[in-house]
Image (tube, rainbow, N blue to C red):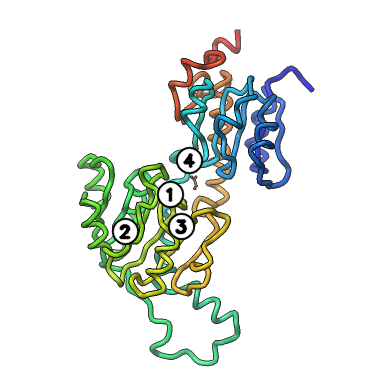
Amino acid sequence: MTDKPRVWVSRPTFDSEIARLAPHFEVREESVEAKFTSVELAAKLADCDAAIVGLKERVGAAEVAGARRLRIVANLGVGYDNLDLVALTAAGIAASNTADVLNESVADFTWALLLGAARRVGAAERWLRAGQWQATEFKGWLGADVRGRTLGILGMGRIGQAIARRAQGFGMPVLYHNRSRLPEATERACRARLVDKDTLLRESDFLVLVLPLTTATRHAIGAAELARMKPSAVLVNVARGGIVDDAALAAALREGRLAAAGLDVFEGEPGVHPHLLALDNVLLSPHIASATTETRRAMTAVAVDNVLALFGHGPHAGHPPNLLNPEAQSAARAPFPTREETTR
Ligand code: GLV
C-alpha cells in the first residue's frame, strides 16, 4: 500500500502505456479479461481514485455509490453507452473516451466488412475449409459489385467521414443522414450529400451505420426501415448492437428482402442472435473494428492521458482532453489540479 492515489485498470492492455501511471499512482491492473458483475465492479471501484474501463464494464449510480474517492472513469472506447453520464456527473466523477485515435482503423475495417459481405468472403472460406472445393462453377459464388454504387452513411461523425473518403477510390456517390449538416468544406472533402433518412434507406446500395447508441437510436434500423431498403442492398453495422433489431435483420436476410450484412456489433453481445448465426449471407466479427496494434495502443494512451491530466500530470495537466462531462467539475470532489499546482 502507498499513499499515492489508486487507479484500477479493468483489463490487460498495453504495459508501456500503463507504466506512465506508475510514478503518480498505485496501479491495480487486472491480469486476465473478466466480466464483472455490478457488485464486483462496485467493490473494485470502492477504494480507487481513478478507473480505466472497457466497454463491457457498465458503470452507473449503483457501481459508484460507495466509490467516495473516485474522480474519473476513463473509457477504453469512443462509444460510452456503458457509462451512465448523468449518474457520474451527479456524483462529481469525470468521464472520458478515446475519440479520434480509432477513426481510420474503424473506417478500414468497415470497408473490410462491406467488401467481404458483398463478395461472400465468409461463406466462401467456410465452404473451402469444409473441403467442398471440388471444382469452381463459373456461376458459383457470385457476389455484388461495389464500384460506382451508392454508399449511404447513417451517422456522419469523424468515423463516418473517414469511411466516406475511402469511397472515392471506388467511385461511389455518398449519401449521409445526420442530426446536423456537415460544413460545406467537409461535405466537399467527403463528396457526400445530406439526405433525409427515408431517402438514405431507399437509395443506398450499401448502408453503413456509425451512430452512437442512445434511447433515440435504439432500433433505428428495425423491420420498417429494412422494408424500405433495396432487396439488393448490403447493411454494415460497426456502431453498436441495439441500433439494429437483429431479429428483424435476420428475417429480412433469410427471406431475401436484403442481400447481405456485415456486422461487428450485436444486441446482447458477446451473444449473437441464433438466426444470424444460421445465415450464410451475413459476415460476422466479434466487435474488433478498432483492433489494430497501433490503434489499441493509442486508445490506451488516450485513457492514460485523461487520468494523468485530471490529477494534474502530463501534457494536458488540469484539462483531460476527452472529457465527456465537463459539468462534473462543479460537483467534483476536488477541482481538477493544474500542473503548476502539482509541481509547487
Ligand atoms: C468501440 O466500439 C468503441 O466504441 O471504441
Q: Residues within 10 Å of mark 4 (few under 14, many from 20)?
A: some
Q: Residues within 10 Å of mark 3 (few under 14, many from 20)?
A: some
| Residue at image location 58% in from the left, 55% down from the top | 270
Of the residues shown, which amino acid type is indicated by label 2? Ala
Asked if residue 299 lies left or right of residue 32, the reply is left
Q: Position of residue 175 (x, y in %)?
A: 24, 55
Q: Earlier in the sequence, mark 1 or mark 2?
A: 1
Q: Earlier in the sequence, mark 4 or mark 2?
A: 4
Asked if residue 58 lies left or right of residue 195, the reply is right
Q: Position of residue 257 (x, y in %)?
A: 33, 71
Q: Earlier in the sequence, mark 3 or mark 4?
A: 4
Q: Quadrant of the N terminus?
A: top right
Of the residues shown, which amino acid type is indicated by label 1? Glu
Which mark, by number, is residue 81? 4
| Residue at image location 56% in from the left, 18% down from the top | 312
Would you identify the image quadrant in which residue 12 lies? top right
Q: Earlier in the sequence, mark 3 or mark 1?
A: 1
Residue labelled with disc 2:
167
Mark whose residue sits in front, 4 or 1: 4
Task: Check the image and report above or below for 336 versus 166.
Answer: above
Residue labelled with disc 1:
104
CA gap, disc 4 and disc 1: 21 Å
Determine the secondary structure under disc 4.
loop
Residue labelled with disc 3:
109
CA gap, disc 2 and disc 3: 13 Å
Q: Residues within 10 Å of mark 2 (few under 14, many from 20)?
A: many
CA gap, disc 3 and disc 4: 21 Å
Task: Check the image and report above or below for 261 versus 127.
Answer: above
